[in-house]
Amino acid sequence: MDLTLRIWRQNGAEAPGRLEEHAVTGVEPDMSFLEMLDVLNETLLKEGRDPVTFEHDCREGICGSCGLVINGIPHGPGERSSTCQLHMRHFKSGDTITIEPWRVHSFPILKDLMVDRSALDSIIQSHGYISVSTGSPPDAGTRLIGKPEADQAMDAAECIGCGACAAACPNGSAMLFVAAKVSHLASLPQGRIEAAERVRDMTRTMFSCGFGNCSNHYECEAACPKGISLKFIAKLNRESLKALFRG
Ligand code: FES
C-alpha cells in the first residue's frame, strides 16, 4: 500500500503547528498504525530529518498511552480499538490519512502528536483510590460481592485512561473517564466507605483541570476503545447526588 500522510507537526504548546505531508510506500495491510508510523520515522531518520513524535508503550491496547486523531476520529476508524490496535487493512492504497494529536484544552501539545495528559493523573491523585486499610488479602469467599456488582466494577475498570473520551467530546469533558473510575470503586464494598469524598474530589479536580461538563453528545462512548458505557455517567451523577445529601 502506498499512502499520503498529513501529519500535525508542532514544537511545543506555544509554537505554531502545521500539517506536513509525507509519502509512505510498502505498507502491509497487517501492519498496525503505529508500525506504519515507525516505517515513516525510519525513512525520516535515514534522511537526517526530525522523526514524528508520538506516544506509545504496550502496543496491546492496555496502557492507554497511544492516542491519535485519525481522519478526524479519536483512535481512527476501528471499532473499540486503540490506535495501537488499529491495522492498516482499514485503509486502501492511495488513501490520504490526516493524523492529529488529541485536541483538548487540558492536554497541551508537547511535540507533534504527543500531548501532556497529566491532568488525568491529577484527577486520579485527587481520590481515585481506596485509602482505608483493607488488611492482608482475605480468603476467597469471606467478603461476598454479588455478581452484578462484580460485573459492573469490572466493566468500569476496563477504562485505560487514554483520554479519547475528552478528545471526542465537543465540550472537552473527561466525564466518562471520571465516571468509570468513580463507578469502579463505588461498586465494591471497599470503595463505598470513601465514595462521597471521592466523587466530590474527582469531579472538582476534573473541572479545575479545565475539562468541560457533559451535555450528552454520546461521542465519548463511541470513541472509547474499551466501550465504556454512558450508564457510568448516570452512576456518577447518582453518586454526586448521594454525596450532596451526605453533606
Ligand atoms: S500503546 Fe498501550 S494502549 Fe496503545
Image (cartoon, grey):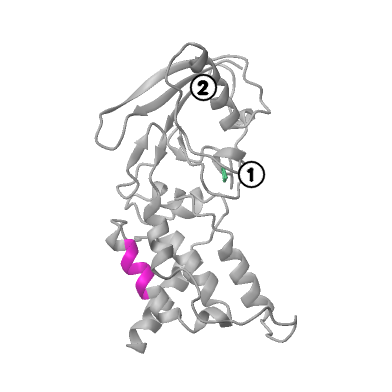
User: Percent x, y for residue 110?
Assistant: 35, 38
Q: Name the outermost residue toward the front.
A: 136
Other residues around mark 2 within 10 Å, as few (<14) / some (14–19) / many (≥20): some
Q: Is residue 204 magenta?
A: yes
* Residue assigned mark 1: 60
The residue at which mark 2 appears reads as: 41
Based on the picture, tell me whether residue 39 belongs to the magenta stretch: no
Total residue callouts: 2
**Which residue type does callout 2 highlight?**
Asn
* Closest to the observer, 149 or 117: 117
* Helix, strand or loop for disc 1: loop
> As drawn, is 17 to the left or to the right of 194?
left
- The residue range painted magenta reads 200-206
Q: Position of residue 115 (x, y in %)?
A: 39, 41
Ligand 1 neighbours mark 1 (CB distance < 8 Å): yes
The N terminus sits in image quarter: top right
SS assignment for the magenta stretch, majority: helix
* Cα–Cα gap, marks 1 and 2: 20 Å
User: Image point 45% across, 26% down: which residue?
Assistant: 52
Q: In screen coordinates, is 51 left or right of 35? A: left
Q: Nearer the viewer, mark 1 or mark 2?
A: 2
